[in-house]
Image (cartoon, rainbow, N blue to C red):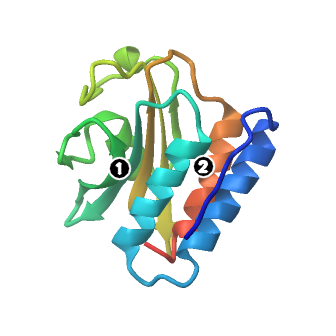
């Protein structure tokens, strides 16, 4: 059994280091990518305060398909030309959005979401999934959050 207790008073970079270590511990010997995404989503939700959704969309036949997540029911399929997740997957670049209502083509799966961070997970230069974090607070995510989740995406790139 794994038991991780993040300290909310840690500096953000240390909290993300501990999150990465926890995800590493639970995924390192597990070959099933879905199981690894599920545990990673659960750990993200534990380590990152003020989220109302945390999870994965997987690249399947040229579109994003819902993967394991923590939060309210979500959109199942996202075309690459739509929303923050589609933008991250189609550009292969992290999307840090302070106000999702100002983002062209935003897909409102949960009306409570106000800001979003989406990081592509790449293998051999191709996007295989995205990590999607939503918050009910405008401007919730910083560049430091983006860097922390990018390091997590790199770790998971050969485990999902």
Q: Which residue is mark 2?
A: 149
Q: Is residue 80 visible?
A: yes
Secondary element under disc 1, as helix, strand or loop, is strand
Real-space Cα distance between discs 1 and 2? Answer: 15 Å
Residue 100 relative to residue 151: left or right: left
Q: Which mark is residue 49?
A: none
Above/below status of 153 relative to 34 = above
- The residue at the point 76 percent across, 38 percent down is 12
Work out which quarter of the rendered image holds the C terminus and state it. Answer: bottom left
Q: Is residue 120 visible?
A: no
- The residue at the point 19 percent across, 41 percent down is 75
Work out which quarter of the rendered image holds the N terminus and state it. Answer: bottom right
Which of marks 2 and 1 precedes in the sequence? 1
Residue 13 relative to residue 152: left or right: right
Q: Where's residue 120, x and y in %?
A: 47, 54
Q: Which residue is mark 1?
A: 69
- The residue at the point 32 percent across, 23 percent down is 104
Quarter holding residue 3 = bottom right
Q: Where's residue 15, x and y in %?
A: 73, 45
> Foreground mark, 1 or 2?
1
Comparing 143 with 136, the one in front is 136
Q: Are marks 1 and 2 in contact (CB under 8 Å)?
A: no
Q: Where's residue 156, x and y in %?
A: 53, 68
Above/below status of 94 relative to 120 = above
Above/below status of 125 relative to 91 = below
Quarter holding residue 102 = top left
- The residue at the point 69 percent across, 46 percent down is 6
Residue 101 relative to residue 81: left or right: right
Q: Where's residue 25, x and y in %?
A: 63, 72
């Amino acid at each position: 059994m794994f038991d991780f207790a993040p300290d909310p008073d840690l500096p953000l970079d240390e909290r993300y280091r501990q999150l990465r270590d926890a995800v590493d511990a639970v995924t390192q010997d597990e070959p099933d990518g879905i199981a690894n995404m599920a545990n990673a989503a659960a750990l993200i939700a534990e380590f990152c305060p003020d989220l109302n959704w945390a999870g994965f969309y997987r690249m399947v036949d040229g579109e994003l398909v819902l993967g394991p997540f923590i939060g309210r029911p979500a959109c199942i399929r996202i075309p690459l030309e739509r929303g923050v997740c589609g933008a991250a997957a189609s550009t292969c670049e992290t999307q840090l959005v302070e106000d999702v209502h100002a983002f062209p083509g935003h897909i409102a799966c949960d009306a409570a979401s106000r800001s979003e961070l989406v990081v592509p997970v790449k293998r051999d230069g191709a996007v295989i999934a995205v990590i999607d974090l939503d918050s009910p607070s405008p401007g919730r995510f910083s560049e430091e959050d983006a860097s922390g989740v990018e390091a997590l995406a790199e770790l998971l790139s050969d485990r999902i």
